[in-house]
Image: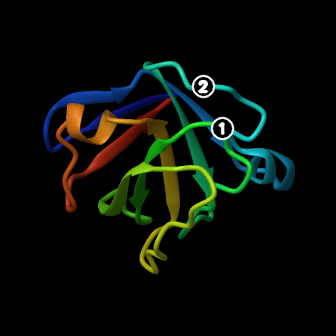
Amino acid sequence: MKIINKTKNNIIAPKGRMANTFWTRAVGLLNRDSLPTDEALIITRCQSIHMFFMRFAIDVIFVDKKNYVVGFVKRIKPFRLSPIFFKASYAIELIEGAIAAKNVSVGDELELIK
């Protein structure tokens, strides 16, 4: 699944993987040592994340039901908690530094393309 920033007209991640079941949401990126630069994990029904037992830092974008960015966390390190973004419907986990590299801002409109 491709993740596009419609506001900035750029691709955030060409390979988005959906975590929409109990198991995929629970595991997330815990079983990984890293995340490729072109990959992202989209976690449904998500207003915050934890980094317990993670092995690497990541960037996280929180998005509402209408696909607008409502918040993000840059470079969240292992064994930390993100803030809660009450308006978020899903989260996109990306490689560390991706938010700055892709110039993502609160209010940007995203699109997920299968």
Which secondary structure, mark 1? loop
Which residue appears farthest toward the right when viewing the image? 23
For mark 2, what is the residue? 34
Measured along the vertical axis of the image, is residue 66 above or below residue 53? below
Q: CA distance from mark 1 to mark 2?
A: 8 Å
Q: Quadrant of residue 81?
A: bottom right
| Number of the front mark, 1 or 2 | 1
Residue type highlighted by circle 1: Arg
Disc 1 and disc 2 in contact, CB within 8 angstroms: yes
Which residue appears farthest toward the bottom when viewing the image? 86
For mark 1, what is the residue? 55
Q: Nearer the viewer, residue 72 or 7?
A: 72
Q: x, y (%) of residue 61?
A: 40, 52
Measured along the vertical axis of the image, is residue 20 above or below residue 1? below
User: Residue at the location (22% across, 31% down)?
Assistant: 101
Residue type highlighted by circle 2: Ser
